[in-house]
Image (cartoon, helix red, strand yellow):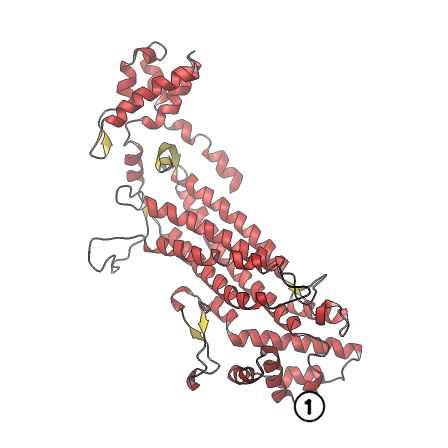
């Protein structure tokens, strides 16, 4: 069952109505694209534009398109009622359309097959969704840029494997995510362009019952391009690219969300989600301020990525068409687009309101008593004439003593104090040499050049 919409046709009051299953995770702008009335409106436009082109060729009488535009209506509940009998959604739509258009409706859908309408409409919906998703990406990108510039020189510890590594800046962390979302925007723009195609080529795609100019006319009017070779359906590698791109974007969202979740841990508390005055963190523990938004984003990313494998498997269809892809797309189309749209705007809000604690960052940076400078000591010893292997051994034995002094969340003895007492170190490095090594300046000296490249 789709995550976004469900229909209970057994209840008269629900006939033809859209039932939102998860309004909690959907925005109206995106959800309405996948509502039945929007789908059928697109179907109506496709049929009307096809009639316009057919009239110009003399295939159907003049005035048919005019009647379709002026009289053409549909009723979702009535379409559902007809489909329950005929078991075919496009025929149900055309039957309901004919009830409004009248006798000239016999010329509608002339030479076309169901996929001509369904696939072209799906392309329109994906294009409409993609344009909204691009707007969401723009919000995230702008927010990341603003906060990255704000914290360009805010020192913090860089971690590998979750363990303190070397100093970096919080702005550089954000700049990395900014660059990732810029790449995501480029990917999505390409994917939207590649999915924005129209196929009106008739049964098995040979144009035997419909002139290729019909496809060109409909494509132009719908803001699409004509498919080069469509068989009876638009090739599903286009759709696979689109949904794979959404999956990559979702992974980038999760990548940022996990960073914030780690930084918000009580033992770290370098950054945290905004917590409003009346917000509650736990039903049992009144003191809690939990990273619920970024945890939520992690979960939503899983939902979006779940569409990737089905989309890839849809590429392989029997011969010129089958409908094994159809049920999949009816679900992953709205699910993925609505969910990712919501996630992007939630992420934008998280970044815009993110609470950042530079003092805590500095405190955490100094927790290990200067161990963050171990590589600089190693390099200084090699420059002073000691082999890398011996220098590594010397630095490591002093560093391990700092680790052994760790208590109450901090190193009780400094790295410098051990180095000053080590004869091998003292033989090569003076007190002034060590003081020059234990400075943060080298870790920020290239920040400007990095920012200049990406902003």
Judged from this view, the residue extending furthest toward the front is: 318
Horizontal side of 322 relative to 384 (left or right) equals: right
Residue under numbered circle 1: 103
Residue 294 seen from this side: yes
Residue 142 seen from this side: no
Horizontal side of 148 relative to 362 (left or right) equals: right
Q: Relative to 388, is 69 above or below?
A: below
Figure quadrant of residue 323: bottom right
Judged from this view, the residue extending furthest toward the right is: 58
Q: Quadrant of the N terminus?
A: bottom left
Figure quadrant of residue 299: bottom left
Q: Relative to 296, is 36 above or below?
A: below
Mark 1, Cα crowd under 10 Å, few <14 / some 14-19 / many 20+, is few
Residue pictured at 41% horizontal, 48% vertical: 256
Judged from this view, the residue extending furthest toward the top is: 427
Figure quadrant of residue 14: bottom left
Foreground of the two, 3 or 62? 3
């Amino acid at each position: 069952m789709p995550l976004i919409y469900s229909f209970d046709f057994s209840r008269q009051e629900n006939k033809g109505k859209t039932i939102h299953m998860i309004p909690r995770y959907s925005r109206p702008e995106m959800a309405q694209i996948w509502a039945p009335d929007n789908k059928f409106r697109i179907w109506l436009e496709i049929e009307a534009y096809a009639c316009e082109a057919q009239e110009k060729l003399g295939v159907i009488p003049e005035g048919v398109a005019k009647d379709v535009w002026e009289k053409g209506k549909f009723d979702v509940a009535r379409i559902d009622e007809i489909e329950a009998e005929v078991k075919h959604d496009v025929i149900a739509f055309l039957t309901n359309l004919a009830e409004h258009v009248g006798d000239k409706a016999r010329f509608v859908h002339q030479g076309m097959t169901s996929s001509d309408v369904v696939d072209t409409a799906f392309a329109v919906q994906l294009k409409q969704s993609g344009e909204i998703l691009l707007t969401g990406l723009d919000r995230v990108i702008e927010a990341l840029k603003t906060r990255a510039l704000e914290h360009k020189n805010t020192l913090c510890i860089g971690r590998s494997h979750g363990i303190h590594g070397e100093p970096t800046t919080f702005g550089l962390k954000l700049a990395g995510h900014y660059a990732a979302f810029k790449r995501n925007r480029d990917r999505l723009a390409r994917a939207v362009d590649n999915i924005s195609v129209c196929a009106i080529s008739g049964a098995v795609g040979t144009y035997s019952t419909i002139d290729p100019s019909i496809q060109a006319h409909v494509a132009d009017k719908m803001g699409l391009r004509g498919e080069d070779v469509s068989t009876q359906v638009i090739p599903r590698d286009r759709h696979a690219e689109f949904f794979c791109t959404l999956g990559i974007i979702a992974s980038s969202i999760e990548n940022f969300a996990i960073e914030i979740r780690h930084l918000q841990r009580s033992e770290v508390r370098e950054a945290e989600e905004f917590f409003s005055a009346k917000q509650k963190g736990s039903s049992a523990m009144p003191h809690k301020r939990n990273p619920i938004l970024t945890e939520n984003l992690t979960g939503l990313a899983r939902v979006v990525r779940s569409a990737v494998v089905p989309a890839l498997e849809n590429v392989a269809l029997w011969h010129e068409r089958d409908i094994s892809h159809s049920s999949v797309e009816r679900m992953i189309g709205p699910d993925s687009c609505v969910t990712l749209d919501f996630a992007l705007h939630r992420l934008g809000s998280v970044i815009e309101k993110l609470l950042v604690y530079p003092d805590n960052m500095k405190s955490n940076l100094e927790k290990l008593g200067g161990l963050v400078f171990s590589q600089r000591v190693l390099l200084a010893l090699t420059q002073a004439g000691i082999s890398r292997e011996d220098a590594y051994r010397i630095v490591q034995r002093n560093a391990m003593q700092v680790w052994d002094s760790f208590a109450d969340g901090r190193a009780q003895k400094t790295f410098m104090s051990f180095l000053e007492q080590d004869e091998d170190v003292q033989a090569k490095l003076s007190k002034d040499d060590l003081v020059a090594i234990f400075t943060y300046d080298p870790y920020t000296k290239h920040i400007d050049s990095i920012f200049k490249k990406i902003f």
